[in-house]
Image (spheres, helix red, strand yellow):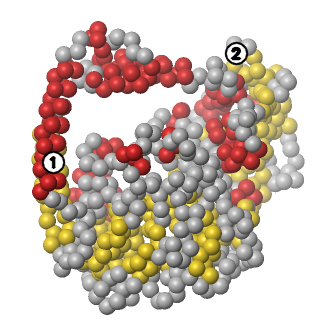
Amino acid sequence: MGTRCKIECIIAFPDRLYVFIYENLILNNQRPIVKPSKILLTVAVLGICLLTAALWWSKNKHEALTEKQIQEPQVGIASAIKSQTFAKTNAENATLLSKDIQGEWLEIDDPSTDGWETEAFTIDAEKQLKYLSQFLTSSDSTDGTQLKKIVADDFSGTQLLPDDLQLVIEKPSITVHRKAKDAVVNTVRGGEEFLQAAENLAESFRNAQDTKIKIKTVSVRPEEETIKTRHLVELSGRIDAATLEHHATWDAVWIPRDDKPPLLSALDVNSFEQTKVIAPHGTLLVDCTRSAMEHNPCYEKQFLHGYEEWLSSMPNTRYFVSLGTPGLAAGDVNGDGLEDLYVCQEQGLPNRLFIQQEDGRLNDQADASQVDWVQDSRSALLIDLDNDSDQDLVVAFLGGVLMASNDGSGKFAIKAMIPTSEDLMSISAADFDNDGDLDIYSTAYFPDHFVEHSHAGGLPTGVNNFVYHDSNLGGRNILLRNDIDGGVWDFVDVTKEVGLDSNNARFSFIGSWEDYDNDGDQDLYVANDYGRDNLYRNDKGQFTDIAEEAGAEDAASGMSVSWGDYDRDGWMDVYISNMWSSAGKRIGNQPQFKKNATPEIKQRLQRFARGNTLLHNNQKGQFKDQSDEAGVEMGRWAWGSLFADINNDGWQDLLVGNGYITGDDSTGDL
């Protein structure tokens, strides 16, 4: 058994009160998660005193700054930011300084002055298309005078809502219609007919609620007298107990004009898909977080506060300071037949274990189960490690993997803490050697000591020798073999021994196991940021990276992996989530983009904006990229993906989790 203690420390700074909880878990003959010493505590106290004095001095100093000193011209953005830091207590001057920074940034980020005329044109064209967006999402029929002004007198195009839609999917809850390939094209000419075409499309959403539209420009091609663009369009709205969605690709031709917005000369609908979901709430999935969790005190005190709010009081923010990357795991921890939920949290916030009740509510039992650790937790697994038929808990901390045994009732006892790379990212489990127990594979992103030794602001791309499209400077992933023997929990690092140390420094996000070649052992796909992924073929416990020869390398910003037999041929296919960028697709295909790079390198860099990848297993050890044909590339900034049969029709569907920092949508690229 181990001992458990907490040390609470309250520190009063001149302008803020901090409460720190220092939790120590010590096991007999085990490495503690945190082990304090008298020297360390003494140094910490001295450091706190010095920091308090420094903050007091800094506050009094910048309060004494005059308005003239604060508003003095600065050289460059960096100087302005430093001045803004000292001017925090003067809200008015800080606002003025912020405007100065914004103005300087707008000058730097002005495509009309830095040689990217196509980007400057994109801004003008999207301003024109905004009139069309407003018309389509209006709740009632509006005056189309302004809309007619964006088209040229000789405008010629197709109907925005195609006449001949072909039914391709009809299920109890979902119907999908698409534009027929051989459909008769009805030409639209002039401003009046264009207005009528827009009215026909808008009519489908006149009675809709929460109508939304997004038009993303993905291609700009200047020609002698015109400019051609391609746009991805999404239009959706709620109508009674249904959600209606339109997804289309528009090909436009513009007539540029000096000192005036461009005019639409043509607009053709290249592809069109209409989806209608009929469900009690209008959507297939309903957010039930509040109803399931709000009765827990931690729901309001912990989970309703954004990550940004906690950053100011976190004692350790070395890795991924701006992201927030904790994971979660689902499993039945108390044997009642209901799935429970373990939620990882950032440094200083307790992890939570929610036990599901028969009415669907989730009760927080983390403290009673002794799993409310406050170390920075990246991911977790609920799996049976010791083959006693209950779900044990594995948690990935920064610098180590913790294993805790379940007594069958949902109470856990720490059994092992295995040191790993510092910036541990994810964990996955499989019986790689077919010996009857589950082994653990952990991935790491940054290499050890990267942040404190780097002058790149915590970003790998700022390092001098960093190769964006093919980096091999990342953290080291490890495979831990399960050697549990009775009550002794032993896990051995066998990474080199089994061949998994090959190509093992690639900023890995996740590893996913599957027997892709149907030979009876588990193979491993690893998704990596900044370049090539790995596909390790397992041959009786020995691994070989065959990603390149198997056509499965997918060199991009790999962030998740999901296996599934999407075509039901008995062989597992794989879907990898990456990043999709409309700006990247536009810029990457311009002649001046990386004009001195080789065609191979330029193609690799262009790949980073393309999006997600679906690799089809050809049953002969090879994979073919079917992403475009299947229509699954565009997943925005995709962090996670999952094959799942959402509507119980026997076919694997795809769910993609995406997004980044919330901001003004008008400036968004994703």
Residue 141 appears in the rendering: no
Q: Quadrant of residue 561?
A: bottom right
Left or right: residue 598 versus residue 489 is right
Badge 2, how many Cα within 10 Å: few under 14, some, many 20+? few
Per the image, the residue denoted by label 1 is 43
Residue at (62% x, 48% y) in the render: 469
Percent x, y for residue 258?
73, 14
Per the rendering, the mark at residue 660 is none
Closer to viewer: mark 2 or mark 1: 1
Give the amino acid at mark 2: Lys
- 184 up-or-down from 241: above or below: above
Residue at (41% x, 82% y) in the render: 482
Badge 1, how many Cα within 10 Å: few under 14, some, many 20+? few
Percent x, y for residue 435?
49, 89
Residue at (47% x, 43% y) in the render: 459
- 72 up-or-down from 265: above or below: above
Per the image, the residue denoted by label 2 is 260
Percent x, y for residue 417?
31, 71
Query: In front here: 180 or 441?
Result: 441
Name the secondary structure under disc 1: helix
CA gap, disc 2 to disc 1? 65 Å
Give the amino acid at mark 1: Val
Residue 468 appears in the rendering: yes
Q: Quadrant of residue 514?
A: bottom right
Residue occupying the far top of the picture? 68
Residue at (15% x, 42% y) in the render: 48
- 545 up-or-down from 203: above or below: below
Q: Quadrant of the C terminus?
A: top right
Q: Earlier in the sequence, mark 2 or mark 1?
A: 1
